[in-house]
Image (spheres, rainbow, N blue to C red):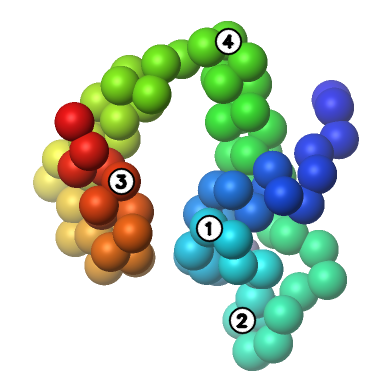
Amino acid sequence: MRRLTHEQISSVRCPTCGVATGKRCVLVAGGLRDEPHGTRKSLAAETVGKKRKKESHAALLARLRKEIAKPNLTKSVREKSTAEDLAEWNVS
Ligand SMILES: [Zn+2]
């Protein structure tokens, strides 16, 4: 697997600690982690891979909207989302 840059990894939200894009992973006890969480690396790899396969921006947005529309996810996803994320997802 190709090694991702910190920039690529930080371009996705961390599924484990929930930090926003562009922020470093945090420890549960508080403070910054030296390394991003494994799940974040996986997600970043997936995202980068999909970009390489040229998933269109519109398709990605449609998928995210579908995800966010799931009843079980809606609340937590919305709570964890930043205004910036929501603004981006609302772009048509
Ligand atoms: Zn994390």
Q: Is the residue marked by circle 4 packed among few (<14), some (14-19), or many (20+) residues within 10 Å?
A: few
Mark carried by residue 76: none
Q: Nearer the viewer, mark 2 or mark 1?
A: 1
On-image quarter of the C terminus: top left
Check disc 4 and give the amino acid type: Lys
Give how far apart the Cα atoms at labels 4 and 2 are.
35 Å
Mark 4 highlights which residue?
A: 53
Mark 2 highlights which residue?
A: 28
Q: Nearer the viewer, mark 4 or mark 2?
A: 4
Q: Decide which of 60, 84 is in the foreground and name it.
A: 84
Q: Is residue 29 above or below residue 72?
A: below
Disc 2 and disc 1 in contact, CB within 8 angstroms: no
Please report the residue visible at 59 percent of the width from the left and 61 percent of the height from the top.
22
Please report the residue visible at 59 percent of the width from the left and 48 percent of the height from the top.
11
Mark 1 highlights which residue?
A: 21
Give how far apart the Cα atoms at labels 2 and 1 are.
18 Å
Looking at the picture, how far across and down is residue 42, in whole percent? 67, 39
Give how far apart the Cα atoms at labels 3 and 2 are.
28 Å
Give how far apart the Cα atoms at labels 3 and 1 are.
12 Å
Q: Is mark 1 within 8 Å of ligand 1?
A: no
Q: Earlier in the sequence, mark 2 or mark 1?
A: 1
Q: Earlier in the sequence, mark 4 or mark 2?
A: 2
